[in-house]
Amino acid sequence: MLLDDRPAAGPPVARAGAVATGLRTLDLLRRLSWVPDRAVRPGLPECRPDIQFDLDRDIPPPAVVDGVRVRFAPVHTVFATAVLTRTPTRRDQRVLADVLDAVERAYPLFTHVAYGLPYFRRLPAGLVALYMPRLLTDSNRFVLEETGPSGHDDVLFTLRGDDPAHLAGVLRWLGRTDLPAGLRLTSTRAMFSQPGLPRRIALHHGLPYAHRLDPRSPTWTGGVEEPAG
């Protein structure tokens, strides 16, 4: 389930609002969800996987629920978009990488960083054209294209973990004004997947259809899928 808190980018008040709304959402989730007791705690692996979203070895094996093998990923996910006020230097890159590594060592959570076209426009065009992959069906088009009117952010941070308090702490850090290269948040979005949590949120807000939600459903649709393999 996705909770959307996306104030527009702009003056400092709007930027502060981007963090505040995300923190309010995480506070609600902290009160209505629980932190699972996992046999394996997420954290910075000694040897990183080839794909940053490959979390298999850091998530416990599937459990059997009603005869179906179910593997639950980290309960909470926060998406935070950001813009740069200047082109980052090598030092900026090192500082951000060091901080994100320190976050993963301090907390049982995962951090992912993705970059949008505005970021790549800050780099030499020839360098981007040389190294950015192109479509197999049309070599004149890059694989990375603008999503639409809302695609104006340089960076997307994806934070994943079981404890919303840890995510809130990282979000507060990202909301500071002295981040490398003048990084400033433009929006935050929170997503979760935990059995019964959609129903508890619906009851908390007094939604008229709350009692129709399956008390064990991890999402609005209520479906769970057997892991591949």
Image: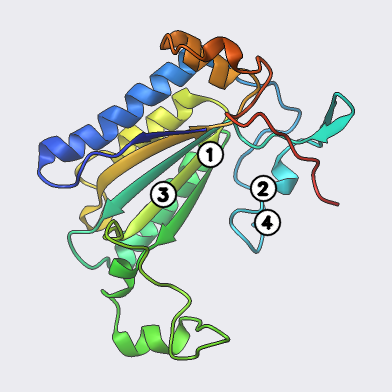
Residue wearing tag 1: 160
Location of mark 3 (residue): 157
Where residue 215 sits: x, y (%)?
A: 65, 14
Residue at image point 46% right, 46% down: 158
Secondary structure beneath disc 4? loop
In the foreground, 223 or 44: 223
Who is closer to the viewer here, 28 or 171? 28
Disc 1 or 4, which lies upstream in sequence? 4
Q: Which mark is residue 47?
A: 4
Secondary element type, mark 2: loop
- The mark nearer the N terminus, 3 or 4, is 4
Residue at 29% across, 29% down = 21
Amino acid on which disc 4 is placed: Cys
CA–CA distance between discs 4 and 2?
12 Å
Q: The residue under label 3 is which amino acid type?
A: Phe
Q: Nearer the viewer, mark 1 or mark 4?
A: 1
Q: Tell me what residue is drawn at x 56 percent, y 16 percent.
A: 199
Looking at this rendering, what residue extends furthest in the right direction? 67
Mark 2 → mark 3, Cα distance in angstroms: 16 Å
Disc with the residue nearer the chain's start (4 vs 2): 4
CB under 8 Å between callouts 2 and 1? yes
Residues tagged 4 and 2 counted as in contact (Cβ below 8 A)? no
For badge 1, the amino acid type reads: Arg
Instruction: Indicate how the structure is coloured in the image.
Output: rainbow
Distance between the alpha carbons at the discs numbered 1 and 3: 10 Å
Q: Secondary structure at mark 1?
A: strand
Q: Residue at x 48, y 15 (%)?
A: 202
Q: Earlier in the sequence, mark 2 or mark 1?
A: 2
Q: Residues within 10 Å of mark 1 (few under 14, many from 20)?
A: many
